[in-house]
Each structure stands twice: as C-alpha cells, then as structure tokens.
Image (tube, rainbow, N blue to C red):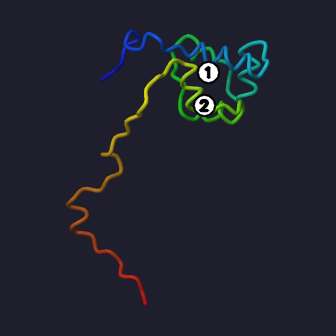
Amino acid sequence: MQRTKDEFPDFNPNQLLDGLHRKLQLKNDAALARVLEVNPPIISKIRHKRLPVGGALLIRIHEVSGLAIADLLSMMGDRRRKFRVSDVHGKPRTSELSNASWPVPAR
C-alpha cells in the first residue's frame, strides 16, 4: 500500500534540513550537501518531497551532527513509536528446514 502526502500532514523534511543548517551553522543546502558528502540534487529532492530521507542518509546525518536518530526523526515530524519490519524476508521455508542436513560438530 502506497502512502499519500496527506496521510502524514506533520511530516516535513524541511524542518530537518533547516535544523541542520542552524546546528551546523551552514548558509545553504549546497554547504549541507558538502558536509554530508552527497550530491546537491539529493538535498533539493528531499526538500521538495520527491525523495525520502533514506536510512543511509539518516545515519550520515547522525554521524555529522551528533544528534540521536530519534531526534532527527522527530525534527521531520515522524512521531511513530514503532517501526515494523517484515518477518518474511530472509526466513527459510519450513520445507527447507526439514530437508536440511546440519553438520555435526567434531569432537
């Protein structure tokens, strides 16, 4: 299910970017891009809500700013308490487990 912009009315990545400008004392988005070591169009696409703030960028922002990930998410307006991760990906099928021959450790 794809989410629309109206489902999260308080979500605004501009608040995060503006907060980083203040915290890091930067003049513009180009300076922020240099500090984060990303191409300037990435910052522009995030600011115009054409690209989400991905996990890798969020971690990079955390490393550069020293702010906690939860604080960074809060700055964007993301107020979720839990993040759901699928338990299906990477889980072996039951049939694969029953047919597996596990190695016996040597003594």
Q: Position of residue 59 (x, y in %)?
A: 61, 35
Q: Quadrant of residue 44?
A: top right
Tell me which residue sits at (64%, 17%) in the image.
Answer: 17
Residue occupied by mark 2 = 57
Identity, as a three-letter code, of the amino acid under mark 1? Ile
Tell me which residue sits at (22%, 69%) in the image.
Answer: 99
Circles 2 and 1 in contact, beta carbons < 8 Å: yes
Tell me which residue sits at (30%, 23%) in the image.
Answer: 1
Q: Is residue 18 left or right of residue 34?
A: left
Residue occupied by mark 1 = 42
**Vertical comparison of 77 with 57: above or below:** above
User: How much space separates mark 2 and mark 1, taking CA atoms?
Assistant: 10 Å
**Vertical comparison of 32 with 28: above or below:** below
Total labels: the figure holds: 2
Tell me which residue sits at (53%, 29%) in the image.
Answer: 54
SS for callout 2: helix
Which label's residue is closer to the chain start, 2 or 1? 1
